Amino acid sequence: METQVKLTKLAACAGCGAKMGAGTLAKMLDGFKTHADPRLIVGYDKSDDASVYVLSEEQALIQTTDFFPPIVDDPYLYGRIAATNALSDVYAMGGEPKLALNILCAAESMKDETIREILRGGYDAAYEAGAIITGGHTIKGAEPIYGLAVSGFVRPDKVLTNSGARPGDVLLLTKPLGVGILTTAAKADMVPGEVMDRIYQQMATLNKTARDIMVEYPVHSCTDITGFGLLGHSYEMAQGSGCTLHIEVGRVPYHPEALEMAEMGLIPAGAYRNREYAQPGVKLCGEIPLAVQDILYDPQTSGGLLIALPARAAEECLARLQEKIPQAARIGCVTEMQESAIKLE
């Protein structure tokens, strides 16, 4: 669908690349007073994907929100990707999304039909996830913004966090990297349409299948790879778990076109923020080209799940994942904490 005004031209940043740096955010929130509640088993102090509040022995409530400026010009696709990205946080916790609220800021130049298509994209993603959009809040502003506030449910003893990885675990990744680099290059018409169609399809694909498979195995930790990139989110997992993550760079799936663009220097600003945040905890083992490093720091929009689980279960889990998600891959392992939080080999 064509729009009179290109949505991506209305925003200074695109997708999860607009995310505030992790280090900056932590400093801004430091020292705020909050209530303590023993039923809140995952809160801000965990730097996790969502909060988790225990309702009963059988059920816990997951709450999260995510929204961002347009990453594509097609309003329906933008809405679907933004909603898919927001729903992903519930999947990363091992839960099932059930209720959602729209968060929408419409630019003055946007037509009613454009706004309707954005919302339709969000509703379709939520419907596929089995969630119900029950309302929301809409305002007018300088730039378009869309996303969801999502509530989901999980058994309290089945909650997955980004701080549970254990030495001996294997790391699995369910979607290839390079989305931020390629969407940046696409703004300069540097990427063929068929390549971007593949990227858009990936961003619009729910992590539901990956979640449904992984919960059948003894997963210790999980997070979704979004605005902080693979290394930013891995850094949080390593710090929260008190472990070192060994990432075998040659096993990490990424779109080959992203490497070409990275070699040309087409890197989103978010990748530099991610590098500034995570690089102090990263040790390079051997020669790793700068362009490949840039892909590892690249901010992803609606990225895949990073899963840590025991080696004894990893092979079967990966085989199951690859039946449905061919590009899912084993990318490394977890060891006792060493001199760095992440080792790239």
Image (tube, rainbow, N blue to C red):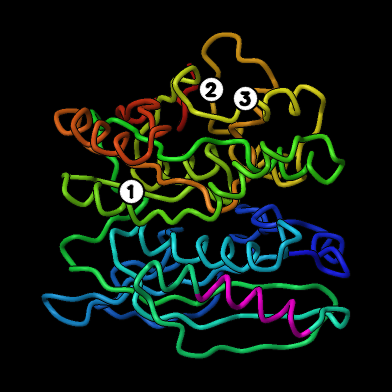
Reading the chain from its start, which is encountered first: label 3 or label 1? 1
Which of label 1 and label 2 is nearer to you? 1
Instruction: Give the image location of residue 321, x and y in percent.
Output: 29, 38
Q: Where is residue 185 in the image (x, y as percent from the top left)?
A: 79, 39
How packed mark 3 is, by other alpha carbons closer than 10 Å (few <14, some 14-19, many 20 or more), is few
Disc 3 to disc 1, C-alpha distance: 23 Å
Residue in the foreground of this view, choosing between 104 and 237: 104
Q: Which residue is drawn at 71% across and 39% down?
A: 182
Q: Nearer the viewer, residue 13 or 325?
A: 325
Which of the two residues, 160 or 77, is positioned nearer the viewer here?
Answer: 77
Q: Mark 2 points at which residue?
A: 283
Circle nearer the N terminus (1, 2): 1
Q: What residue did someone put label 1 on?
A: 210
Q: Give the range drawn in magenta.
A: 112-123
Residue 331 image offset from top left, x and y in percent: 40, 27
Cα gap from disc 1 to disc 2, whole angstroms: 29 Å
The residue located at (19%, 60%) in the rendering is 158
Residue type beneath disc 1 = Ala
Judged from the image, the secondary structure of the residue bearing numbered disc 2 is strand
Q: Residue flagged by tag 2: what amino acid is it? A: Lys
Q: Magenta stretch: dominant SS?
A: helix
Quadrant location of the N terminus in the rendered image? bottom right
- For label 3, the residue is 256
Identify the residue at image location x=66%, y=58%: 19
Do labels 1 and 2 touch, CB within 8 Å?
no
Compared across the picture, whether 141 is left or right of 221 comes to right
